[in-house]
Image (spheres, coloured by chain):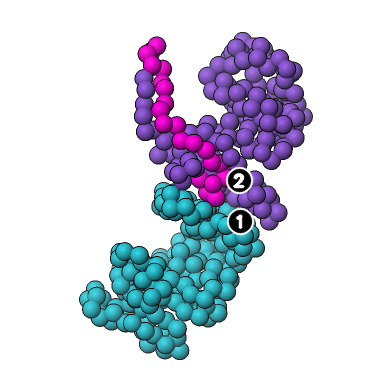
Chain colours: A purple, B cyan
Amino acid sequence: MVYCGQVNKGLVEMLQRRGVNAVGLSGLDGRIWEGPRKSVIRSVEKGRTRVIRDDYTGRVEKVNTALLRALAAQGCLPVLTPPAASYEGEAVNVDGDRAAAMTAAALEADTLIILSNVPGLLRHFPDESSLIARIDRRRIDRFEEFAEGRMKKKILGAREALEGGVRRVILGDARRAGPIAAALGEKGTVIQ
Amino acid sequence: MVYCGQVNKGLVEMLQRRGVNAVGLSGLDGRIWEGPRKSVIRSVEKGRTRVIRDDYTGRVEKVNTALLRALAAQGCLPVLTPPAASYEGEAVNVDGDRAAAMTAAALEADTLIILSNVPGLLRHFPDESSLIARIDRRRIDRFEEFAEGRMKKKILGAREALEGGVRRVILGDARRAGPIAAALGEKGTVIQ
């Protein structure tokens, strides 16, 4: 079972030391992230498909925006992490980027920033000079082929956020100084 | 450094599975528990007093009742655990029973229940037949001598809760079935 851990609480402490009233929560807390638990998982290993039953994974269908807004009204900044809650109240692991996309859409966010250890979507991974600076949301299909590894889920999350009403998704570089300000300045891959 | 961990999140999941919308939080989250960090710790080992500097321990002076009430208004049940926040936003370890006492007083609670692995305060620890069933709050001083080990902090917490306006403190047995209902039925040591 996956529980929120040191990374989440470490971020909360770093924010608190800077005077930001952060609150670390998993999606299980207050059922912030809720959805069905998958009954069957398909896993492809060395070209063979394995079927795994009774694993605790799922996906987010509902976001408790009332609770998130109540926290914001108290001056708090939620810092969210998997797991989510199944409809039966079980802790289920979910993809963090897709959960963030669902959250951005549910909160009617203007912008979703997804940071990782690359500058954005690269045309020729891992060549960082091949950064794709802008993607028209109507043409996102054509760019999915460039996504390697975990970037695939980030592109899927970006698509889901845009389909959910988010105006702009920015894939930014977590390694640089001031990564959020840089991303808001459209350093990275802007999908709009 | 102490962070909230598996016990807190395990309780949240058990409550969620029973339909209770629990939210697991440390006192650092939203500065629910805030207070000074001790600059110097005195520790007595084998009769010698050691002075430890720069340890991350403290005590709770302020409780963010606005946030706790906002969570309750959302139908959520907070499940709290150390650490607390220092006034500088650092995570500091605090005694959980005394933090619970501060929280009960700040929320103007009628009753504080403190559960442990004994039936309550025992006149002759560990003889469980020597349970002290009732203590008059004006005479709590005379009973402090019976507290052994961790029970000392529970009695101190009880005193602080009563001084803070809580009407009744019950030291109950965590090992029995339905421990909270039993404690509310005044099984255990009732201090009033």
Q: Which chain carries label 2?
A: A
Which residue extends farthest right?
Answer: A185
Please state the chain letter of the residue tagged with numbered disc 1 in the rendered image.
Answer: B
Give the percent coordinates (x, y) of residue B75. Answer: 57, 57
Tell me the quarter of the image containing the C terminus of chain A. Answer: top right
Instruction: Name the image quarter holding residue A123.
Output: top right
The three-letter amino acid code for the residue at tag 2 is Asn
Query: Is residue B129 rendered to the left or right of residue A122?
Result: left
Which quadrant would residue B28 be assigned to in this image?
A: bottom right
- Region of the chain picked out in magenta, as a range: A28-49
Residue B171 at x, y percent in the picture: 38, 74
Q: Quick check: is A42 in the magenta stretch?
A: yes
* Residue drawn where x is 38% and y is 16% of the image: A49
Which residue was labeled with disc 1? B74
Q: What element carries label 2?
A: loop
Residue flagged by tag 1: what amino acid is it? Gln
Determine contact: label 1, label 2, CB under 8 Å.
yes
Horizontal side, residue A14 vs residue A41: left or right: right
Q: Can residue B64 be seen in this view?
A: no
